[in-house]
Image (cartoon, rainbow, N blue to C red):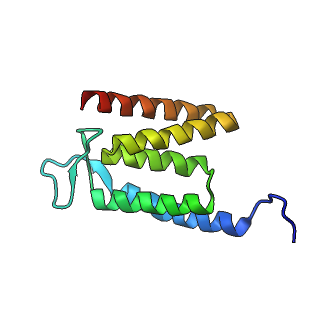
Amino acid sequence: MSTSPEFDKVRFNAGTAVFRLGYSHFNKGSAPRAPKIPRGWAENPSDPKGMIHPARLRDAVRYFDISLEIWPHDITTLNIRALTLLTLGDFKAAAKAYALVLAEAKKTDNAPYREQAEKGLKKCEEYLASA
């Protein structure tokens, strides 16, 4: 059996399937703010024009964590996980997550994700400084 690092299609497909579940929960867990916030929803801590469903977003983070266990350095999953934590208002965890995105973006020379990570870190630092 070979020990060389090869692309593992089964692991990739499994990671992608779990990522899709997380992304679905993320999409269902954030929305523009309604005049009256429905039961189970709350004001978005990082954007007062929006509202969130915290339980769905926490589930999304859990799905992203599982996806990262399968495919650890997937920058897309790292980034959406960081965004989900920011949306939840967990600014300390989001800052740590964005630091991982930034490290991966620098390692792979990925300018768009580097920019997003830097913006996310800045936003987290602003919220943490004002708290």
Residue at the outermost bottom position: 1
In the rendered view, tell whether residue 100 sits above or below residue 24: above
Q: Can you tell which quarter of the image residue 101 is in?
A: top right
Q: Nearer the viewer, residue 37 or 42?
A: 42
Measured as percent of width and height from the top left, residue 20 is found at: 51, 62
> Residue 42, percent across and down?
20, 51
In-image side of 126 versus 7 (left or right)? left
Q: Nearer the viewer, residue 20 or 3?
A: 3
Count all numbered tags in the image, as a single digit.
0
Q: Is residue 102 left or right of residue 86?
A: right
- Image vertical order of residue 67 relative to residue 90, above or below: below
Q: Where residue 51 sits in the image (x, y, percent)? A: 25, 48
Q: Is residue 24 in view from this perspective?
A: no
Residue in view at x 58 percent, y 61 percent: 69
Direction left: furthest residue: 36
Identify the residue at image location x=24%, y=32%. 131
Percent position (x, y) of residue 38? 16, 58
Reply above or below: 112 against 43: above
**Quarter-of-image position of residue 39:** bottom left
Q: Residue at x 53, y 65 (%)?
A: 18
Split into 4 quadrants, where in the image is the N terminus? bottom right
Closer-to-camera residue (119/97): 97
Kindly tell me whether residue 35 is visible in this rendering.
yes
Task: Write the residue at 20% across / 61% down.
Answer: 40
